[in-house]
Image (cartoon, grey):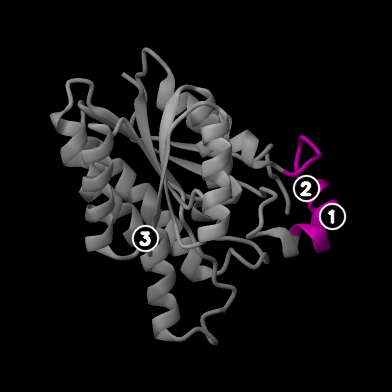
């Protein structure tokens, strides 16, 4: 029986890279995103690898929609083995400029979405003999508080830090049947960060020990490891993948 993964934010960027890597490892993949054309492109790429794909247009901050997605995937494919919470949104405004609803939206898309999909999918995994695995995309900014980049202001950093606490707490609640970890990427070249990397890319490379920016494929290798490694004695952890970003 094929294994099944759900990837939120799977239309492009890190989510797309991870979805394609999971497909290469034999997973059928359900994509969740608001970007319909990009999501259909990724679906086609998954199917070109000989795997099945489903797509769900959804605002990840909506609790009820998360449950609809989980129930439909389980109905169609009978199981969910891996969940990647990758969907996210930046907010470049500082504390003196941001409006309450903008702060709330940043928290909802980055942090509450993880709660929504874990809440929806954990019961499915717990019923499976094999249990399941979950990874949630945090950020290096959760540890550093951010720098001057557009995605690293306080609301984004707070949301991503919340994912670390959620991960540790749920690893205790859901273990040993479900293993859950978090990933903290540094500067990754994606559509979300393109304006930053284009304007400051060469400067930023100087502050990274490996002298390059990261790619979705870099993150995808770590995600695939967390999804597929056997045996696996890892839960409740966060993994920094930044090429050793010592000054950016």
Q: Nearer the viewer, mark 3 or mark 1?
A: 3
**Could you tell me how far apart the alpha carbons at marks 2 and 3 are, in whole angstroms?**
33 Å
Against 118, is 243 above or below? Answer: above
Q: Which mark is residue 203?
A: 1
Q: Which residue is mark 2?
A: 207
Asked whether the beta carbons under mark 2 and mark 1 sit within 8 Å of each other, the answer is: yes
Crowd band around label 2 with a 10 angstrom C-alpha radius: few (<14), some (14–19), many (20+): some
Q: Which residue is mark 3?
A: 60
Residue in the foreground of this view, choosing between 201 and 1: 1
Residue in the foreground of this view, choosing between 188 and 51: 51
Q: Magenta stretch: give its range.
A: 197-213
Q: Residue at x 58, y 64 (%)?
A: 152
Against 59, is 25 above or below? Answer: above
Against 156, is 72 above or below? Answer: above
Q: Residue at x 58, y 38 (%)?
A: 45
> Which image quadrant for residue 197?
bottom right
Crowd band around label 3 with a 10 angstrom C-alpha radius: few (<14), some (14–19), many (20+): many
Q: Residue at x 16, y 40 (%)?
A: 123
Where's residue 89, x and y in %? 51, 64
Where's residue 120, x and y in %? 22, 49
Q: Quadrant of the C terminus?
A: bottom right
Where's residue 193, x and y in %? 67, 59
Residue in the foreground of this view, choosing between 16 and 105: 16
């Amino acid at each position: 029986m094929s294994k099944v993964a759900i990837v939120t934010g799977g239309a492009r960027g890190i989510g797309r890279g991870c979805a394609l890597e999971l497909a290469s490892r034999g997973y059928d993949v359900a994509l969740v995103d608001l970007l319909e054309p990009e999501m259909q492109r990724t679906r086609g790429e998954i199917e070109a690898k000989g795997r099945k794909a489903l797509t769900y247009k959804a605002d990840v901050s909506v609790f009820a929609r998360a449950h609809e997605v989980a129930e439909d995937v389980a109905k169609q494919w009978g199981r969910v083995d891996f969940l990647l919470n990758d969907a996210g949104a930046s907010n470049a405004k500082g504390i003196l400029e941001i409006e309450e609803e903008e702060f709330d939206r940043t928290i909802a898309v980055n942090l509450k979405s993880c709660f929504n999909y874990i809440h929806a999918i954990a019961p499915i995994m717990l019923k499976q003999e094999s249990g399941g695995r979950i990874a949630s995309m945090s950020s290096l900014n959760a540890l550093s508080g951010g720098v001057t980049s557009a995605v690293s202001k306080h609301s984004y950093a707070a949301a991503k830090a919340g994912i670390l606490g959620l991960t540790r707490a749920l690893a205790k609640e859901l273990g040993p049947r479900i293993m859950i970890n978090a990933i903290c990427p540094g500067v990754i070249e994606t559509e979300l960060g393109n304006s930053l990397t284009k304007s400051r890319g060469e400067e930023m490379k100087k502050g990274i020990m490996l002298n390059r920016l990261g790619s979705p494929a870099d993150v995808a290798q770590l995600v695939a490891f967390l999804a597929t490694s056997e045996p696996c004695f890892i839960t409740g952890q966060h993994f920094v993948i930044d090429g050793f970003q010592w000054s950016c």
